[in-house]
Image: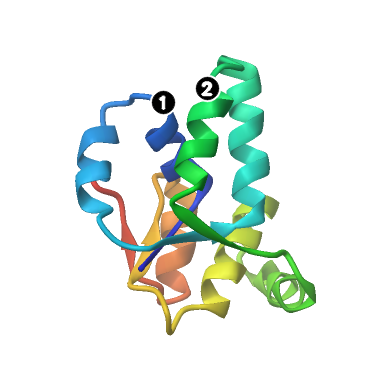
Amino acid sequence: MYYLDSSAVVKLVFEEKESKTLREFLKQNLVSSDLTKIEVYRVCARLDKKSIEVANKVFDFMSFFEINKKVIERTKKLIEIPYLKSLDSIHLSTALGIAELIDGVVTYDKQMIRAAKELELSVVSPV
């Protein structure tokens, strides 16, 4: 099972150069944060509102974790990684909370890849 951040999910909604390889790689259970829905819907609203339907179909194949108090507490501790953006810290703290359940994090964001490795999470970016 893999945790997908928004950069990965967007590649499942919109056709990008990595999309085909990513789809082939992801043949198992997929999880993410509720934050992903918000971020992907915002991208869809900006680029093509009709793509929201595609996003909803992608979301049907995923499970989502709430941004609860435990996630917020873990996120606070990530302040030690100064280059990590706020929303990325929520993604990583969610992944850390389920680290024993996932094979790794799928992301294409360079700063998130760097931070995930610092946090000893396995990172995959199929191309």
Q: Quadrant of residue 52?
A: top right
Q: Disc 1 vs disc 2: which is toward the camera? A: 2
The image shows residue 24 at horizontal and vertical percentages of 19, 46
Above or below, 72 against 90 in this view is below
Residue 48 lies, in percent from the top left, at 56, 15
Q: Earlier in the sequence, mark 1 or mark 2?
A: 1
Q: Is residue 125 visible?
A: yes
- 62 vs 81: above or below: above
Q: Which mark is residue 3?
A: none
Quadrant hosting residue 83: bottom right
For badge 1, the amino acid type reads Phe
Q: For mark 2, give the secondary structure.
A: helix
Residue at the extreme bottom of the image, as rendered: 100
Residue sitting at x 68%, y 42%: 38
On screen, residue 35 versus residue 76, left or right, reads left
Seen at 49% across and 48% down, the residue is 60
- Residue 103 position in % (x across, y down): 33, 72
Q: For the residues marked 1 and 2, what is the alpha-carbon distance in whole angstroms?
A: 8 Å
Residue 51: image tag:
2
Q: Secondary structure at mark 1?
A: loop
For the C terminus, the image quarter is top left
Dot 1: few (<14), some (14–19), or many (≥20) neighbours within 10 Å? Answer: some
Quarter placement of the N terminus: bottom left
> Where is mark 1, residue-wise?
14
Residue 69 in the image: above or below residue 7: below
